[in-house]
Image (cartoon, rainbow, N blue to C red):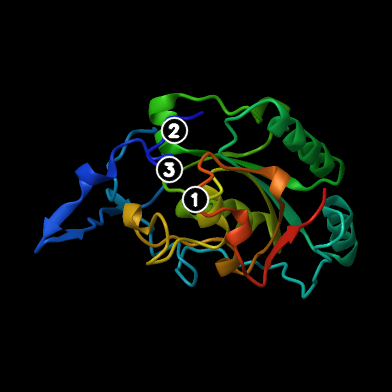
Amino acid sequence: MLNTVQGNPYLKNSESSKEETSGEKKIPRGEPSWRVLSPKLRSIGEIHFNRELAPSGKESVIASNYLSYTPDISGDFYDEIDKALRSGLKFVLCLIDVYSDAEYIEELKKLVVFCKDRKIDIINFEFEPILAKAKKKCKIANFLPQSTPNIVKPMPSIFSTPETHDHLRRLNAGALIIAGEFDNCCIRSSIIGIKEGTEYFEFDGEEFGAVEYGYSVYTQKKLIKNYDPTSPTLHSMEHERLYKFSSI
């Protein structure tokens, strides 16, 4: 298991990075998120989600291959993706913070093969604080095509770096297949975002997810891993463009 702070992949204690103001905790907001050139540890609140990358921001991507297609979430995950592909919907597979192994990785290998066979583009994401301290090796990297982009994100959401927007803009997709780890943090923020009043907002503030950029999201519980069973999971995420399939 990764060394986390209360189930969060951030590696510095949040209490030490907060300021006290009139008896209330003030959450500091630092520099806007940007490309990670060299992974390093950051204090909680040292960066915030770059508003130029937020939905409607001048550097943000918007799903441009959008089709009004609704899959049957009671159907098989792979069968429903094939149906969507035949309808003309274009997908990108986003693999987020895959540091585990064993049975979970075997399920992701099947997903990678499925996408490769259908020429679905793949993007692999890693999280800066994990790379900076834990030096964990991404367990899925050896099974990906050599041309697969590897993006290091400074915040939990995959949309916190302009590299994601650049790649998705080029790939012109309307739907994302999302698989990976930390469903209560990195997965949640990448799918539906983090808002005030929800878990983890105190760390770096508001973040934005795929559905807010117009993407449909396809996923299944066997493709998502969490380290904190007491925190909200995939089951608690709801949005009209989030499709959680019952079987795979």
Q: CA distance from mark 2 to mark 3?
A: 11 Å
Tag in front: 2 or 3: 3
Question: Where residue 158 appears, x then y in whole percent?
Answer: 52, 51
Where residue 49 sits: x, y (%)?
38, 58
Give me the C-alpha separation between circle 1 and circle 3: 10 Å
Q: Secondary structure at mark 1?
A: loop
Residue at (45% x, 24% y) in the render:
135
Outermost residue, left direction?
Answer: 22
Which residue does the numbered mark 1 point to in the structure image?
A: 231
Residue found at x 44% / y 33%:
130
Instruction: Give the quadrant of residue 98.
Output: top right
Query: On screen, 76 above or below 216?
Result: above
Which residue carries the number 2 mark?
130
Hey, what amino acid is under mark 3?
Asn
- Identity, as a three-letter code, of the amino acid under mark 2: Ile
Residue 182 appears left or right of 87? left
Frontmost residue, 191 versus 119: 191
Residue 60, percent from left and from top: 50, 64
